Image (tube, rainbow, N blue to C red):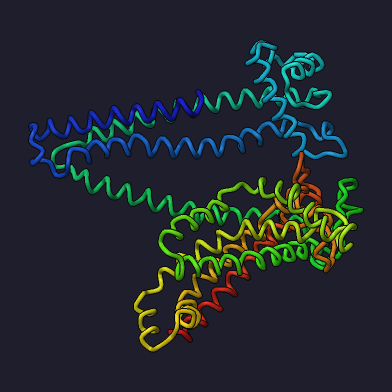
């Protein structure tokens, strides 16, 4: 049963339980709601919670665990002799999953019957041909071990989904019956519902923490695996980035310094554009602009934040790059050889970051109490002196936060860099040369079927961990500066 229909069934059970629970509560009080401990809706909501929460928890855990259990079971069906020398068990399992999806697509399109798809004696040459006719993405020849594993994969998946559907529906019905059975006039339904809601809110808040922990752990484990295959000294201090996917890293040079330099160089150029323009815009909108001008200008600035980054990338590739090339290219000053360069990506990225700095800084400046401005004016200060000596110091922590957010956004940008800065990994001071960043190389290293037994794929996690540590250090340093200044200001 599809998950969508399973969710609808559980919701229908919960809706019916709400009606029955509410009616049962009123019946137990002889129709007089004043005799109930709680409002009638709380009794219905109690049934709803007991019908939905346990069922959905089981469904979520099942959906997370089933792929791991099925993959572990199917992986044992593939002998070592079926794994090519230039491949790995992970790549073979990816082929098994594609073949299983292809069998599903072929059955759905009528290219083969369900019995044929499950036939253990089916000719794998015939199956390969039918899968390709159905549009499945498979290799030129599906081997017999892969076909047998794919058939087993489909059977286990179908069985697991059937068992999950039965378990979830049964648990939902039992939960609803439990809630209905509890429904009596003296039952403290309100306390139970409020406790349940509080637990749900705690669980929702915990998801962010657990997600962060999961991201960090995945980076740490894969980074450790990378450094087992590639020397850490060559990675952190190497000045050449030249990955090669032949020979499992024997001829690869994976020095991160050129990528870090490109990342910081492009980000600095972007911040040199975004911070002055964004901060000055915020000061004007909050301190000088009339309400009419502000009502028009601020939404127009914030529109920039809603433009997809791919559009900025195309703008850099088709407009800003050729414009800079016409001025600084061979026919101009001769400093620029192509439209893709640090300056191209930096300028466009700076335009993209303007609303991050402007909007947040404007809100922070507006939050400064008017009494501080009035006190400054009462002492004879001009408006510019008040802004410079009172308003900006009071708003500095928020402004630093806005700049930090813009910095993190710049460091993590990918599409503008790919289209506007090029793909050259090198150490160069010329802002009119093509360079690349860490995020762009993470994408390129994980494009396609990555073999996670090779350092060329695992290096993406090492690059991500490096960026994580750098941004964490920047956050800690900025927090220290803000607190130090706040102590002096207060």
Closest to the observer, 370 or 47: 370
Q: Position of residue 7 (x, y in %)?
A: 43, 30
**Which quadrant holds residue 10?**
top left
Closest to the observer, 83 or 470: 470
Viewport quadrant of the C terminus: bottom left
Above or below, comparing residue 466 to residue 172 in the picture: below
**Which quadrant holds residue 234?**
bottom right
* Residue 230 showing in the rendered view: no
**Which quadrant holds residue 273?**
bottom right
Above or below, comparing residue 409 to residue 415 in the picture: below
Q: What's the residue at 54%, 51% (across, down)?
A: 303
Residue 200 appears left or right of 39: right
Q: What's the residue at 32%, 48% (across, down)?
A: 197
Above or below, comparing residue 212 to residue 185 in the picture: below
Q: What's the residue at 58%, 67% (across, down)?
A: 404
Q: Position of residue 436 (x, y in %)?
A: 78, 57
* Residue 192 showing in the rendered view: yes
Residue 241 appears left or right of 481: right
Instruction: Farthest residue to the bottom: give it.
Output: 379
Q: Position of residue 137 (x, y in %)?
A: 75, 26
Closest to the observer, 434 or 31: 434
Q: Position of residue 439 (x, y in %)?
A: 71, 54
Closest to the observer, 131 or 224: 131
Q: How many marks?
A: 0
């Amino acid at each position: 049963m599809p998950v969508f229909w399973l969710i609808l069934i559980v919701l229908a059970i919960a809706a019916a339980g709400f009606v029955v629970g509410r009616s049962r509560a009123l019946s137990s009080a002889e129709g007089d709601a004043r005799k109930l401990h709680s409002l009638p809706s709380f009794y219905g909501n109690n049934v709803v919670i007991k019908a939905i929460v346990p069922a959905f928890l089981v469904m979520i855990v099942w959906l997370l665990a089933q792929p791991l259990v099925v993959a572990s079971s199917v992986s044992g069906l593939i002998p070592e002799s079926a794994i090519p020398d230039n491949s790995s068990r992970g790549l073979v399992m990816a082929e098994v999953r594609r073949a299983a999806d292809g069998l599903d697509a072929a059955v759905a399109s009528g290219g083969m019957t369900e019995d044929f798809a499950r036939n253990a004696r089916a000719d794998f040459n015939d199956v390969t041909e039918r899968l390709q006719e159905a549009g499945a993405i498979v290799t030129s020849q599906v081997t017999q071990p892969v076909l047998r594993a794919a058939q087993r994969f489909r059977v286990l998946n179908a069985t697991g989904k059937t068992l999950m559907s039965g378990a979830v529906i049964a648990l939902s019905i039992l939960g609803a019956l439990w809630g209905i059975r509890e429904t009596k006039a003296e039952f403290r339904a309100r306390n139970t519902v409020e406790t349940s809601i509080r637990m749900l809110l705690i669980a929702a808040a915990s998801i962010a923490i657990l997600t962060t922990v999961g991201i960090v752990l995945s980076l740490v484990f894969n980074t450790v695996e990378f450094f087992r295959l590639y020397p850490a000294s060559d990675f952190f201090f190497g000045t050449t980035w030249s990955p090669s996917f032949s020979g499992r890293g024997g001829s690869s040079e994976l020095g991160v310094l050129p990528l870090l330099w490109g990342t910081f160089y492009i980000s600095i150029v972007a911040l040199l554009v975004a911070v002055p323009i964004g901060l000055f815009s915020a000061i004007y909108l909050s301190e000088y602009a009339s309400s009419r001008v502000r009502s028009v200008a601020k939404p127009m600035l914030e529109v920039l934040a809603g433009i997809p980054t791919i559009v900025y990338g195309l703008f850099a590739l088709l407009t800003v790059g050729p414009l800079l090339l016409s001025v600084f290219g061979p026919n101009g000053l001769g400093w620029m050889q192509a439209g893709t360069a640090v300056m191209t990506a930096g300028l466009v990225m700076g335009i993209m970051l303007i609303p991050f700095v402007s909007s947040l800084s404007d809100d922070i400046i507006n939050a400064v109490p008017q009494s501080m401005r009035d006190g400054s004016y009462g002492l004879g200060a001009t408006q510019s002196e008040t802004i410079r000596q009172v308003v900006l110091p009071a708003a500095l922590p928020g402004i630093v936060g806005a700049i930090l957010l813009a910095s993190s956004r710049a460091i993590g940008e990918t599409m503008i860099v790919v289209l506007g800065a090029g793909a050259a990994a090198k150490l160069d001071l010329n802002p009119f040369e093509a360079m690349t960043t860490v995020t762009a190389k993470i994408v390129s290293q994980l494009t396609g079927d990555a073999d996670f037994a090779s350092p060329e794929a695992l290096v993406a996690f090492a690059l991500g961990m490096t960026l994580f540590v750098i941004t964490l250090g920047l956050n800690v340093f900025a927090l220290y500066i803000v607190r130090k200044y706040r102590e002096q200001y207060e």
